[in-house]
Image: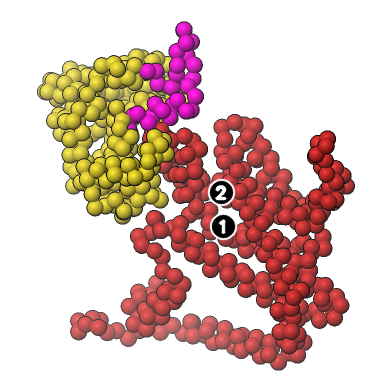
Amino acid sequence: MRPDDIQAIPARHPGRWIAAAAVFVLLIATAYSLTTNPRFEWSVVGEYFFSVRILHGLLLTLELTVISMAIGVVLGVLLAVMRLSHNPLVSGASWFYIWLFRGTPVLVQILFWFNITALYPNIGIGAFSFDANNLITPFVAAILALGLNEGAYMAEIVRAGILSVDEGQSEAGAALGMSRLQIMRRVVLPQAMRVIVPPTGNEAISMLKTTSLVSVIAVSDLLYSAQLIYSVNYRTIPLLLVASIWYLLVTTLLSIGQFYIERHFGRSATRGAQPTPLQRLLDRFMSARTSTRPNL
Amino acid sequence: MSDIMVQAEGVHKRFGNIEVLKGVSMQVARGEVVCLLGASGSGKSTFLRCINHLEKIDAGRLLVDGQLVGYRQVGERLHELHDRDICRHRAEVGMVFQRFNLFGHMTALQNIIEAPVLVRKMPKAQATLRARELLARVGLADRGDAYPNQLSGGQQQRVAIARALAMSPKLMLFDEPTSALDPELVGEVLDVMKSLAREGMTMVVVTHEMGFAREVADRVVMMHQGRIIESAPPEQFFGAPQHERTRQFLSKIL
């Protein structure tokens, strides 16, 4: 601090203190309940947290999430580009797809794919025909339902991203003799990523949780594995806690991954890289201490 | 090889019901520098964009280096060109935009090598070497690794010029290249354009920089309401304008 700097008495904020006190009381009450209510059965939670069946379920949930999201992203880009096509049939087809898959509940779609064999007992033409029952296992049905549904949502996200890129960028590419495909791939999509990534992170997190719906077609994901265990030992709450904590852990990991991906695609837009959460926390701590931050 | 680089005959362009170009006819000789002047809405930018087929013309004929823009003539009939051929045409005509339009996610150097590598299939090492030469030429040898938003407007526009030159164009189009710049940055861009003109590049420049037009242009063309109303060498154009509308325009701007 320099000798000429203003040394004022900080303004008082009694409202903030009251709010903080209320939050503190609630925190204590929650912590008290969590630790003293024996029905949480934390020992059972600990017992099953790393059990093989739960871990198998977790692995399956992760597989479903990754594969379905991959299908969703690829399909989404394709549908978004189709939607922006000058050919009315091509853009109309994309519109129809989005309308159909966004307009029906994903749970219904899961059940539909699971029962698709009732509609098409054989898949293929002539000699290359397969029994649909062998082809569409519950896992495949789950992947199809989640991936195709996700494609519809991703299409809208990608389209918003493409439209967010200034038209001058495409024009500059065209003026250099680049083809429409080259412009899309090299100029527009990379810049659309800044708009596409944050909602896609949301979608991935949402997908992780939506996969729990596949328990209705007896795919032994994380939730269904927990259900199978508590249907035998009746420890319902602890096993739901096991599943919930795993969902929370993976969601947290996904959020951290999302942050770094956003930072990567934002690097040309911000001067220098954004601070990481740790740096931000330190900054806030330091500025609160020295109170150089203006009160907003 | 023809001595006429750009030939326009009665070019018309409509946007919906609004006719923006109402029969523009002009020629630009190889090596000539032509400045297009006119109030906003006079159609000068639209005409420029027609030359590399960013806009499709509705009537008339437009040729660049003896080739129809956007069409192929078979007998009496015109056939629309395939996208691939349009791209080939555009690759030979450089364009510089008012708002620079540098690719925001690429460094200055990447901006310059992108099209030569992608469109001309030039080896990356060779393209990089050439890009460094071009950056040095526009006075930005040390800014190759900067992203566009780390550069001033004048620097961005100079990179944009280098990017267009990297394709070795036979014709350069400038669409108000200094209109979005702070006044003290205009000079550095004009200097690059002047040196380009001295080296014999054929240029069509839409501009409000009268000093540039007077000093560099071989011919100054005045557009008004979608038509060319006056076309003369700069001494005559600025010294003794023939058309009433030109006199009004010049009195306001000089």
Q: Is residue B161 above or below residue B44?
A: below
Quarter of the image where one finds residue B28: top left
Residue B175 seen anywhere in this rendered image of the structure: no
Give x and y (percent) for residue B46.
36, 28
Residue sitting at 46 percent across and 49 percent down?
A191
In magenta, the rendered stretch is: B67-94
Q: Earlier in the sequence, mark 2 or mark 1?
A: 2
Q: Position of residue A114 (x, y in %)?
A: 82, 53
> In this picture, is B84 found above or below B96?
above
Residue B250 part of the magenta segment: no
Q: Secondary structure at mark 1?
A: helix
Q: What's the colour scheme?
A: by chain
Residue plotted at (29% across, 51% down): B144
Q: Which residue is mark 1?
A: A199
Reply yes or no: does residue B91 show up in magenta.
yes
* Residue B163 percent location from the top left of the image: 32, 40
- The alpha-carbon separation of the residues under discs 2 and 1 comes to 10 Å
Kindly identify which chain the residue marked by label 2 belongs to. Answer: A
Q: Find residue A242 and report its horizontal and vertical position in percent.
A: 72, 77
Q: Which chain is yellow?
A: B
Residue at 57 percent across and 51 percent down: it is A157
Q: Quadrant of the N terminus of chain A?
A: bottom left
Task: Tell me the crowding category of disc 1: few under 14, some 14 to 19, or many 20 or more residues within 10 angstroms, Cα based.
Answer: some
Left or right position of B210 against A9:
left
Q: Chain of mark 1?
A: A
Is residue B238 toward the left or the right of residue B48 in the image?
left
Which residue matches tag 2? A158
Chain given the colour red: A
